[in-house]
Amino acid sequence: MKEYFIQNAKDFMDQEITLKGWVYNFRKGGKLWFLILRDGTGIMQTVISMNDVPEEQFNLKSTITIESSIEVTGVVREESRSPGGYEMHVTGLKLIALAEEYPISKKEHGTDFLMDNRHLWIRSRRQFAILRVRHTIIKAIRDFFDDKDFTLFDTPIFQQAATEGTSTLFKTDYFGEDAYLSQSGQLYGETGAAAFGKIYCFGPTFRAEKSKTRRHLTEFWMVEPEMAFYDLDMDMDLAEDFTMYIVEQVLKHRIPELEILERDISKLEAIQKPFPRVHYNDAVKILQENGVDFKWGDDFGGADETIISSQYNSPVMVHRYPSKIKAFYMKRDPEAPEHALAVDMLAPEGYGEIIGGSQREDDMALLLQRIDEEGMTPESYKWYLDLRRYGSFPHSGFGMGLERTVAWMCGIKHIRETIPFPRLMSRLNP
């Protein structure tokens, strides 16, 4: 039996097809009733007339419930007033499973209730649209790097040492040894760059940040490319091309979803290369000129990032942060050692950092010095230091947080809606 789906039902105009899905909504009349069907690819209005179906099928209107699973057969016809511009005139209706009373009704629900019912909430039109955009971004990520001959390089979730500082590690017992959930695949990714030249890792990462802001999750997905013989400028060039490609793909494939989300598409369409590149010192000046009492050497908070990014229509890349506030593996600027060859890409409209990257320290002595300054033990990084012992090379990379990128593309306020099951400080269920 041939499969048909709502997303391509218009290709079968004036033909009889069969669809399977769930009852999204319905409106009952006398000799006619309307049922909105969803099948995971979209929603479509169906029209059920007592003249077109057997009596027992027509009378399902008295028992059918929201989210019941059904099979409908009918002819697809044009109808400008219906979603998508077409509807189905039903010739056959089969109830597969009758659903109990659906807990998420049309009335307003609080965030806690919706999050407690996240397993059901993701069926809603808005959440469906967000997660479809997420899918497209993930596909764009893989296509971009695959087309540029990067090798996918999987890195471990259980790790023995910190990548982004010890204060945000999730600790676990690993058969009597201390182990930590991965904060980043980057250090292992560097080993891949030494073998393949250009790699990317893509998977879940974990940060035990005691943060309740709209920008933070304790579990999130990150894509991390690592490139041999790239300096910071080449790193920024790649990050710019990568981000631009994601914007283009979302605009190409997900306009209907963005319209459901009431996203101001013009703001995405206005994004163009080259992105502004702002030295940390100049970013500090921007803050001070906007009345912020900011001290050189501090890191930017969320409000600071919003002020800096608000000066531009495209993402802005702030580079050469003070080395003291950046990770041990980031190379210092040879011309100004107080600065690290690091970059953060700030999304416009107040969405904050979506990319963080740097040129990596390839000098063995300087790397050992940085490990010592951070109070870490060289023994924990023996395998990582081997990359400098056996054929050290200049290299760079960055990480993009998937969920923040989804939030920016969708124009939504809180990151919790960007992943099927968000993990927050106060939420481990469902």
Image: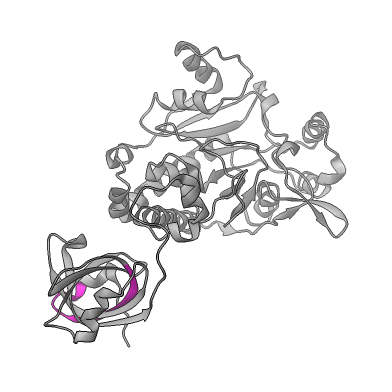
Query: At x 56% / y 40%, what residue is drawn?
Result: 216
Question: Which residue occupies the foreground of this view, 139 or 57?
Answer: 57
Q: Position of residue 109 (x, y in %)?
A: 41, 48
Q: What secondary structure predominates along the stretch shown in magenta?
A: strand
Quadrant for the N terminus, please. Answer: bottom left
Q: Is residue 370 left or right of residue 214?
A: right
Tell me, what colour scheme is on the image? one colour
Q: Eyeballing the image, is 115 above or below 263? A: below
- In the rendered image, residue 13 lying in the magenta stretch gets the answer yes
Quarter location, residue 326: top right
Q: Is residue 3 left or right of residue 92?
A: right
- Residue 26 appears in view: yes
Quarter location, residue 45: bottom left
Question: Residues in magenta?
Answer: 11-23
- In the rendered image, residue 61 lying in the magenta stretch gets the answer no
Query: At x 71% / y 42%, what residue is drawn?
Result: 163
Query: At x 44% / y 14%, what residue is drawn?
Result: 290
Q: Position of residue 324 (x, y in %)?
A: 70, 25
Quarter location, residue 128: bottom left
Q: Position of residue 154 (x, y in %)?
A: 64, 59
Query: At x 34% / y 37%, what residue is drawn?
Result: 271
Q: Is residue 420 left or right of residue 167?
A: left
